[in-house]
Amino acid sequence: MYNVLITVAAAGGLLSCLLCILQITKRLRLPGGQESAAITKFSHDGYQTYLRKILVLSALVYACCAGLAYYLEFVRHGITDHLMLGVISVAFLLILGVAWFTDILHRRMDRRVQMLQKASMSRLFRHFLYAGALLGLGATLIALGYIVSTERLHSISAELLLLPAYGGALVLYWLRFNVSLIARSSDYAFELMGRQEATLPLVGQANPLWRLRQNLASVNRFFFYHLEYLILCLVVLLIATQVEAQTKIFIAGKFSISILVFAMGIISAIPAFFIMRVRDKTSPETFLWNIRIGYIAAISIQAVIAYFFLVVIAQIHIKYFWIIFLGSLTAFLLNVYSAIYVAENHKTARSLIAAAASSVSTVIHRGIASGMRGAAIPALIIAAMMSLVYLLGVIDERGENRFGHGLFALSLALTSMVSLFIVAQATAVIMPLASTTIGRIKLEARRGEKNDLLEKFRNLRSVSVPSYVLHGKIMFSALAILIFLVYAQILSDAGAASLFKHLTQTAMLLIGAIASYFLSARINELVLNLGPLLVRETSRQFREIPGLTSAEVEPDMRGLWQIAVRYLTRKVLPLFIGTMALPAFSCLLGGTYGLAGYLIGFGFFTFLNGNSWLTSGAAWSSARHAAEADSIVTRHTAQLEALVQADIVGDSMHEAAAPTLTGALTATIIGSLLFTPATLELHEKLRDFVKTAF
C-alpha cells in the first residue's frame, strides 16, 4: 500500500509534467482569427558566455567537494562503498541539467507570452500555470527520486548525501550575487539615466541598459527560485529522514513517514492546478481568492490522504495527522497575510500612495515600517506553529525520547509545508513574465491596443506579487525551522545544551547576526555603486558608436556586461568567501557550541532581514504600479515621482538583498552539516595545543 502511494505520486507528477510540456510546446491557434504578436529578439551577448563559464565553475566546485568528501568518508573512515560517489556525482549533474532546462523554458515562455499577449486573461493565466507547475513538480520529483534511491544506503552518512545540494547551493549563491545585482543595478541605472541625460533615447532597443534590464530582471525571478526550491527539498528530506531514524519511528518494512508525507503533498498539489481558474472580468481581489482556493484544495486533499494512510491503515498516533495539517496550514496563513501588505488594492499600497502626496521621505518611512511589520508577523506565525507542533509531538511520550519526538514533529511539519510549496511556485512565475511583457508593451504596442494590453498584464502582475512574496516568505520560514533542527538535533548534543552554555556560543551568535546585517547592507550598497558605472558606459556608447541613437546598429552588450561582471567579481568575491568561511571559523574556535551559536544568529537575523526587505520592496513596487494605472494620481507628477523613487529603493531590497540572503543561508546550513565532523576534530586539536602551550 505504501509503495503504491509513492508510485502514484511519481506517476501523477510525471504525467502532469508531460501534460504541461505538451501545452507549452504545442502549436498556437488563437481564436477569432487573431494574429500572433511579432516576437522581439533581444541580444544575450555576454550572458551566454557567462553561463559557459558557470558550467566550468560548477565542475570545479563540485570536484573539490567530492575530493574532500572522498577523503573525509572513504579514506579517513575506511568506507568501502564507492558506488555512492557515482550516485552523488550523477545527482549533481542532474541539478546542472535542471538549470539548463529552466533557462530553455524561460526563453520559450518569454516567446510564447509575446505570441499570446492578445489572448484572453484566462488563457494567459493557464499558460503561466503550466510553466510554474512544471518547475515545481519537476523539483519535487527529482528530490523524491533521490531520497528514495538513497534511503537504504545506511552505510553512508547523511552528510555525504548532501554533497550535490552543497555544490548546487554554492553555484546558485555565486550566480545570485552576480545576476541579481546586475539586474537591479541596470534598473537603477536606467532610472538614473533618465534624470541625467533626458535627451538620449532612454526607451528603445538601441539602449543597452534597457536590454540588460529586460533580460536579467526576468531571469533573476524565474530561474533561481526554482533551483533553490529543488535544493531545499533535498535538504529537508535528508534531515527529516535522519531525525526520524534517530527517533526510531518506523512503519515496519516501508518507506519513512517523511517520504510518505512528501509524496502526499505531490499528489495533493496536482488537483489544485486544475481548480485555479480566472475570468477576464475578474477583480484583483477575486483573482487572489481564486488562487487561494487551489491552496485550500491542496491542504484538504492532503489532510484526507494523511488521515487515511497514517491513522486508518498504519495506525500511528493521530497527533501526526494534526502535525501535518498544521505544517500545511502555516503556509496558507502566510499566503493570506502576504496579500495584506503587497497587493495593489490592499490598504498598505493605498496608504503608500496617500503618503506620497506629502513627500518622498514619508512614503519611504511608511514602507520601512510596513516591512518591519511584515517581518515580525511571519516570525510570530512560525514561532506559534513550532510551539504547537512541538507540544503535539511530545504527547504520550516519556523519558529522554520526548525531545527527539518533538524534533521529529517539527521535521514532519516542515516536510508538509515544503511539499505544498508547488502551489506557490506555480503562481509566482507569473510576475517575471508579466513584468517583462509590460516593458515590451510600453515600447511596441500599437495605438488603441496599448491600454487594454497594459491593463491585462498589470492585473496579472498585481495578482502575482503576493504569490511572489509568499514564495520568499515560505523559503525563509523553512530555512528558519531547518536552522533550529540542525542546531538542536545534530549540532548540540541532541538538544541537551542550553543556548548560552558557553560564552563562545554567545559571541558567535553576535558574529552571525552582524554578518547578516553586513551582507545585506553591502548588497544594497553595491547596487548603488554599480549603477553610475553602467550609466557612464551607456552614455559612452551613444556618443562613440555611430548610428546607435537612430537604432541603425546594435549596442555593445558584451562590453556593458563585462564591466558589470568585473566590478562585481572584485567586490563580491570577499563577501562570498567570508560567508562560507565564517561557519568554519566559528566551529574551529568554539566547537559545537560556537557553530550552533553562529547558525542561530545568522539564521534568525537573516529571516528578519529577508522578510523585511521582501515586504517593503514589494509594497513600494505595488504602490507605484497602482499609481501609474490611476488616472487621478498620474496627474500629480510629484506624487508619482515620490513613488518611483521609493520603488527604486525597494527594488534592490526585495530583488537583490533578500534573494541573495536566501542563497547565503542555504549554503551556510548545508556547509555546516557537511564539514562539521572534520572541523570539530581540528577544534579538539587546537584546544589541546592551546592547553599544552599555556
Image (spheres, rainbow, N blue to C red):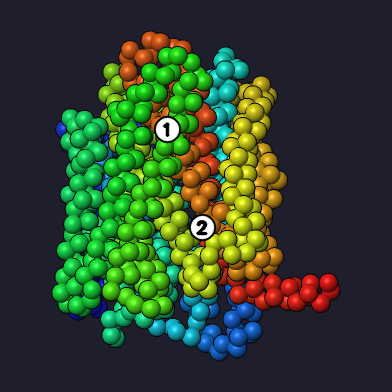
Looking at the picture, how far across and down is residue 271, in whole percent? Answer: 19, 56
- Determine which residue is flagged by label 2: 666
Placement of the N terminus among the 4 image quadrants = bottom left
The kind of residue tagged 2 is Thr
Q: Say whether residue 557 is visible.
A: no
The kind of residue tagged 1 is Ser
Q: CA distance from mark 1 to mark 2?
A: 26 Å
Relative placement, left or right, of 628 versus 452 is: right
Looking at the picture, how far across and down is residue 693, in whole percent? Answer: 84, 74
- Determine which residue is flagged by label 1: 370
Image height check: is 229 above or below 247? above
Image height check: is 336 above or below 620? below
In primary-sequence order, the first of circles 1 and 2 is 1
Of the pair 246 and 2, the residue shown nearer to us: 246
For label 1, count other residues whose C-alpha is less than 10 Å away and answer few (under 14), some (14-19) or many (20+). Answer: many
Give the structural element (helix, strand or loop) at label 1: helix
Q: Say whether residue 491 is visible.
A: yes
Of the pair 328 and 3, the residue shown nearer to us: 328
Residue 451, quarter of picture:
top left
Image height check: is 539 above or below 244? above
Q: Residue at x 21, y 61 (%)?
A: 302
Placement of the C terminus among the 4 image quadrants = bottom right
